[in-house]
Image: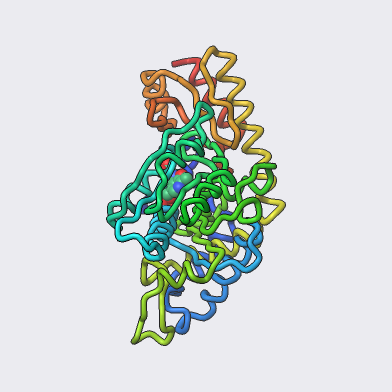
């Protein structure tokens, strides 16, 4: 019997989504190509260069360096690794807001770097003063998040970059999820808006690319140099990615999704997702729940745990925030009809 994958009909808290049809087809064709060996597989390597170029265009960087990573976890780990390798200090640390994704905890553990988490403000964004208090001469990297995993908040990137400058650290922006919606907002978050050095931006989240397709971008070649190891027996002589053999499907899929959707398709995704988030926020508020205002297409509300569990029983794939709020991510597959049916079930349980 052939097994079927999960369908997206009741998936509300995931940051994965239905890939664009062109991306599916491109992924299928490039399944056996390895962008980790660009001299043997130049066709997929060329696609990867074009993806990086396009991601640069989306993030205000005219001559971007980078590659298609396995996801946000690898890209964040590589940001920490580059900063550690470039730091003068024998005991470097990373300062991030407490809202940063747990991948930074993995990175700190793997790389043996101290991770200092700064309390966020009442607005759930990084507080530059709190970050400044934790930063010192040993700080190698300051992290800001552009679209937090739990509340979709955009940190004050320019102020955080100011802190990074002051202590001689690199500035990293984690736009793993937010990077494909923020270009259509007036938020300041990218390489053009602030002296950002490194960025995570994942085509396999809002970008409608197949998994795995993460994005690692750097302003300066020296960041990639700090990651590169010699590869004496390959025709290409060095490799900056963390993984060796990498997904040609991810690279080709990201390329096809970007070709099909940047910019108009992504703008539509954003506008529809944002309108859905605002509709859901109103629907929940009118039922008396306390709702966290959706800055980006992500809604959190203090729906009691038992109610969330009852909705899960109905087949809804919803997961709570760390503090237990219901969290709905308005990804491209999340339609108004789905949300109407979800709210009807919420009223019934
Ligand atoms: N940075 C941010 C801001 C993220 O939200 C995430 C993942 C990452 C980095 C790490 O990215 P990768 O998972 O690609 O390594 N955010 C989601 C989360 O942890 C990932 C996710 C996706 C979880 C789909 C569940 C799911 O069904 O919630």
- From the viewer's side, name the closer residue of 25 and 148: 148
- Residue extending farthest top: 288
At 62% from the left and 60% from the top, the residue drawn is: 258
- From the viewer's side, name the closer residue of 124 and 72: 124
242, above or below 148, in the image: below
Q: Where is residue 296? Give x, y as percent.
A: 59, 37
Q: Where is residue 230? Give x, y as percent.
A: 36, 80
Q: Would residue 204 be seen by someone viewing this image from the given angle?
A: no
At 46% from the left and 48% from the top, the residue drawn is: 143
> Relative to residue 13, is residue 183 drawn left or right?
right
Residue 33 occupies quadrant: bottom left
Q: Where is residue 312? Give x, y as percent.
A: 39, 28
Q: Where is residue 144? Give x, y as percent.
A: 50, 46
Residue 186 occupies quadrant: top right
- From the viewer's side, name the closer residue of 57 and 2: 57
206, above or below 240, in the image: above
For the rendered model, the colour scheme is: rainbow
Q: How many marks?
A: 0
At 45% from the left and 20% from the top, the residue drawn is: 303
At 37% from the left and 71% from the top, the residue drawn is: 245
- From the viewer's side, name the closer residue of 248 and 236: 236
On the rendered image, what quadrant is the C terminus found in?
top left
> Relative to residue 139, is residue 109 drawn left or right?
left
Q: Would residue 155 be seen by someone viewing this image from the given angle?
A: yes
């Amino acid at each position: 019997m052939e097994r079927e994958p999960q369908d997206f009909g009741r998936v509300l808290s995931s940051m994965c989504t239905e890939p664009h049809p062109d991306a599916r087809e491109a992924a299928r064709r490039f399944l056996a190509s390895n962008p980790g060996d660009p001299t043997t597989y130049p066709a997929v390597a060329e696609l990867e260069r074009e993806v990086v170029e396009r991601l640069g265009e989306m993030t205000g960087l005219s001559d971007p360096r980078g590659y298609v990573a396995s996801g946000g976890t690898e890209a964040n780990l590589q940001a920490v690794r580059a900063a550690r390798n470039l730091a003068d200090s024998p005991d470097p640390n990373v300062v991030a807001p407490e809202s940063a994704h747990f991948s930074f905890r993995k990175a700190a553990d793997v790389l043996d770097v101290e991770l200092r988490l700064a309390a966020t403000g009442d607005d759930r964004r990084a507080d530059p003063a709190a970050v400044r208090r934790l930063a010192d001469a040993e700080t190698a990297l300051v992290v800001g998040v552009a679209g937090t995993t739990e509340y979709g908040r955009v940190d004050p990137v320019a102020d955080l970059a100011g802190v990074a400058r002051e202590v001689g650290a690199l500035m990293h922006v984690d736009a793993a999820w937010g990077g494909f919606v923020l270009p259509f907002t007036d938020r300041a978050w990218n390489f053009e808006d602030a002296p950002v050095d490194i960025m995570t931006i994942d085509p396999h989240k809002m970008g409608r690319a197949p998994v795995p397709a993460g994005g690692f971008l750097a302003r300066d070649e020296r960041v990639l140099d700090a990651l590169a190891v010699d590869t004496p027996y390959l025709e290409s002589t060095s490799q900056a990615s963390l993984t060796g053999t990498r997904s040609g499907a991810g690279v080709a899929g990201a390329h096809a999704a970007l070709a099909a959707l940047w910019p108009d398709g992504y703008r539509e995704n954003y506008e529809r997702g944002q309108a859905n988030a605002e509709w859901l926020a109103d629907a929940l508020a009118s039922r008396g729940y306390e709702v966290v205002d959706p800055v980006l297409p992500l809604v959190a509300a203090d729906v009691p745990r038992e109610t969330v569990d009852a909705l899960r029983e109905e087949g809804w794939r919803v997961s709570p925030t760390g503090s237990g709020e219901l969290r709905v991510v308005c990804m491209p597959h999340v339609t108004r009809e789905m949300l109407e049916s979800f709210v009807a079930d919420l009223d019934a349980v």
